[in-house]
Structure formats: C-alpha cells, structure tokens
Image: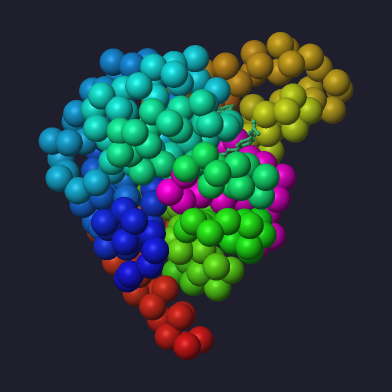
Amino acid sequence: MKTAVTELLGIQAPVIQGGMAWVAEHSLASAVSNAGGLGIIAAANAPYEYVREEIRKARELTDKPFGVNIMLLSPYAAEIAQLVVEEKVSVVTTGAGNPSAYMKQWKEAGIKVMPVVASVALARLMQRAGADAVIAEGCESGGHIGESTTMTLIPQVVDAVSIPVIAAGGIGDGRGIAAAMMLGASGVQMGTRFLVAKECVIHPNYKERVILAKDIDSAVTGRSTGHPVRQLRNKMTREYLKKEQEGCSFEELEKLTLGSLKSAVQDGDADYGSMMAGQIAGLVKKEQTCQEMIEELMAETEAVLGRIR
Ligand code: TUI
C-alpha cells in the first residue's frame, strides 16, 4: 500500500509501531520493520548505553529502516537525542513533550523526525520546526495521553498542517486504519495490538490481560497530577484513583506507580504493575507474528477501502 508515509519512510505498509516504554525493544522493532512496517525502539527512561545496545541489536536483525522514540520526560532525553545522531538512526519519534530544542541537530543529521502530538497547536509548531510528519495521538491510547479523541484530533490536525499526519489511539485493525485514512491520515501508529505480537517480549501475564480485556477495562490515573496515564484496571489503579479522589499529594501517588511499568513488563505483576494499554485492547484477541499482523491489517484495510471506493 502506497501513501505519503510509505514514500517518506521507504516502507511497504503505512503502519508504525508505537514507542512503548520498556516494551518496544530490538526484537519487536526489528520484526515490525522486517514485516514492512516501521519498528520503533523506545528509549523510555533508559540510559545512553542501554539504548545504544538496543539500536545495535536491532541492526543485526534487520536491514530495513527503524526508529527510536525519545520520551522527553526522561532524564536522559538530551543524551539520547545525541545518540540517535551518532548511530545514524533513520527515524526519530518523540513523546510526552515538545522536542523543538533537538530538531535542528536531527534535521542536520538527515534524520526523519515525527513528533507525537496531542494538540493542533503542537502539530503546527512541529511543522514550523521542520518535522517530516506528525503522529497525532488521541486519548484512546495507552500510556501518557492528551485530552482529545482520535476522531476529533485527526481531521483538525490534517487541516492545520501540510506534512503527512499519522493517526494513533484506538486503532487495532483494518477498519480502524481505513477510518483514519478517511479522516485524512496517511498512516497509523499502533501500540496495543503489537503488545501481543509473538516477537514482543513482555511477560505472558501482561499479554494475557490484554487478550482478556474488554472494552471498558482501562482506567486513566494521574489526571490530578497533570500526567494522565491509561492502563488496564487492577488493584493499583483502583487504589490510585481512590487516593486521587481523596486529594492525596503527588508524592504519595507516585509511590504507587514507581517502577510499576517495569514490574508489569518484566515480572508480570497483574495486581500492582502498570499494564499500559489502549481502549482498543478489547478488540485484540490473538497472538500473531508481526508478519501475520501486518498482512492481515493490510488485507482488511484494502477490503474496507475497496467497499467505499
Ligand atoms: O508519550 C506518550 N505516551 C507515553 S510516554 C510513557 S512513559 C511515562 N510513564 C509514566 C508517566 C509519564 C510517562 C508512556 N506513554 N504518547 C505521546 C504523547 N505525547 N501523548 C501526549 C503527549 C504530549 C502531551 C503534552 C505531548 C506534548 C505535550 O505538551 C507539549 C508542550 O510542552 O507543549
């Protein structure tokens, strides 16, 4: 399938894998890229050497382009911004902030830059700063989210910028991809669906919770702290939301989530781990290889678009 995004990135399918913290490592990223999409390694809160190793391991597994996601709240963000230049990474995506300070160094290095935005204002700013595309992410997404839904955000961002727009948040199958394209997107970013990819190395308990999740099984913690995060409901989210309602301090709330993403991903702690996932988890029913997923997604998209054309 050819779109502005496949042309920009030199890939076969307009599907970008989300830069999921502690989930998106070299094996998932290389498998998505080998399947014709764009794999992404998440730098998350990880230090320089860890991310450099991940990039090098991915290079051994694929000769296709892949990207690195820089989480801008990370204490290592500036070092990782330099690392992607040194390692000549093809694509950079960013999350949870405004990457303006790094745009010049990335563009001079010939890196394709696709910031994740949750508002029209940041999309406009990113176009002016030289972004090659923007990933507009609605609040159906897992993880750190903005205010707008995908349905409302995508057409407004499409009208505001002339660079390609990639839709994210709530997309889990070919119907979602086709719908995003109807709204003017030239590609999609998907996270939750890739959580259950065979090549995704998260703990089996996490995969099982995603596969068993129903439509209303995610909860957003941290609205009161200014860091809203969507994850699957469990003991931790229930205690967190109760404490939030009681007006607990930021520090008190932080104690509940400290290290909780790592304990979900690595130890499979289904009770107190932060199993970040989007609202589309209810649609995700089976483990597949990335190749199977992308082939199925493209066939479904073509079928839906064919009916409309
Ligand atoms: O970044 C994400 N999703 C994430 S990051 C993450 S790691 C983390 N874990 C716990 C707490 C905080 C982070 C898990 N999931 N998605 C992209 C995204 N960016 N969503 C929303 C935004 C965003 C929000 C506000 C981007 C910019 C912004 O304001 C920028 C500004 O300063 O104007």
Q: Is 234 left or right of 93, judged from the image as shown?
A: right
Q: Quadrant of residue 147?
A: top right
On whether residue 148 falls in the magenta region, the answer is yes
- Towards the viewer: 34 or 195: 34
The quadrant of the rendering that contains the N terminus is bottom left
- Towards the viewer: 269 or 154: 154
Task: Please say whether residue 196 is visible from this viewpoint.
Answer: no
Q: Is 252 left or right of 285, judged from the image as shown?
A: right
On whether residue 233 falls in the magenta region, the answer is no
Residue 36 place in picture, x, y as percent: 25, 58
- Towards the viewer: 6 or 301: 6
Residue 235 place in picture, x, y as percent: 65, 29
Which residues, given as a range, are shown in magenta? Answer: 131-152
Q: Is residue 67 above or below residue 250?
A: below
Residue at left offset 31%, top offset 61%: 7
Task: Please say whether residue 257 is visible from this viewpoint.
Answer: yes
Residue at left offset 86%, top offset 22%: 246
- Towards the viewer: 282 or 290: 290
